[in-house]
Amino acid sequence: MDTHTRLHKTISALADGELATSELELAFAALDTDEGRQAWEAYGRIGDALRSDLCGHELSAHFDAQLASRLANEPAPGRDGGIAPVSGALVPPGMPEPLEMGPLAQR
């Protein structure tokens, strides 16, 4: 993965509340660059737009669950570029679903 992509993935995970503690130092270093600050601002605007009632597009009460269900039924890409089936739980038992921890869960 190139540096640009890694920077954006790290900042996105931080904005979503999904960044591992072990990667916080990398995230803060990324935010100390012009590109990092621009990415943080962009992700903030995206989050603001998704949570805003001004857009006239309100997410249904079950949007998170429906999206998670549809994504769980999508085939996962295989290591060789092909499609590999997803087996078992994507989130270990007892762990919160990623959508339960992010900003959408706070609405």
Image (tube, rainbow, N blue to C red):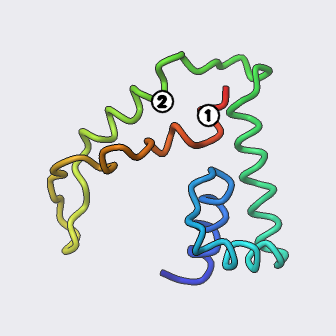
- In primary-sequence order, the first of circles 2 and 1 is 2
Q: Which mark is residue 104?
A: 1
Q: Is residue 56 left or right of residue 67?
A: right
Number of other residues with Cα within 10 Å of mark 2, as a class: few under 14, some 14 to 19, many 20 or more: some
Left or right of 80, for residue 39: right
Disc sitting over residue 13 in the figure:
none
- Image location (x, y in percent) of residue 102: 60, 42
Amino acid type of the residue tagged 2 in the rendering: Asp
In the image, residue 8 sits, relative to residue 59, either above or below, namely below
Alpha-carbon neighbours of circle 1 within 10 Å: few (<14), some, or many (≥20)?
some
Relative placement, left or right, of 56 versus 38 is: left
Identity of the residue drawn at 80% across and 21% down: 54
Comparing 65 with 25, the one in front is 25
Asked if the residue at tag 1 contacts the one at tag 2, i.e. Cβ–Cβ closer than 8 Å, the answer is yes
Q: Report which quarter residue 78 is drawn in.
A: bottom left
In the rendered structure, the answer to whether residue 80 lies left or right of residue 32 reads left
Q: Is residue 64 above or below residue 54?
A: below
Expressed as whole percent of the image width and height from the top left, the position of residue 81 reads 23, 70
- Quadrant where the C terminus sits is top right
| Residue type, label 1 | Leu
Where, by quadrant of the figure, is residue 19 drawn?
Answer: bottom right
Give the residue displayed 76% in from the left and 27% down from the top: 52
Disc 1 secondary structure class: helix
Q: Which residue is mark 2?
A: 64
Taking depth in this image into account, of 69 and 23 the one nearest to the observer is 23
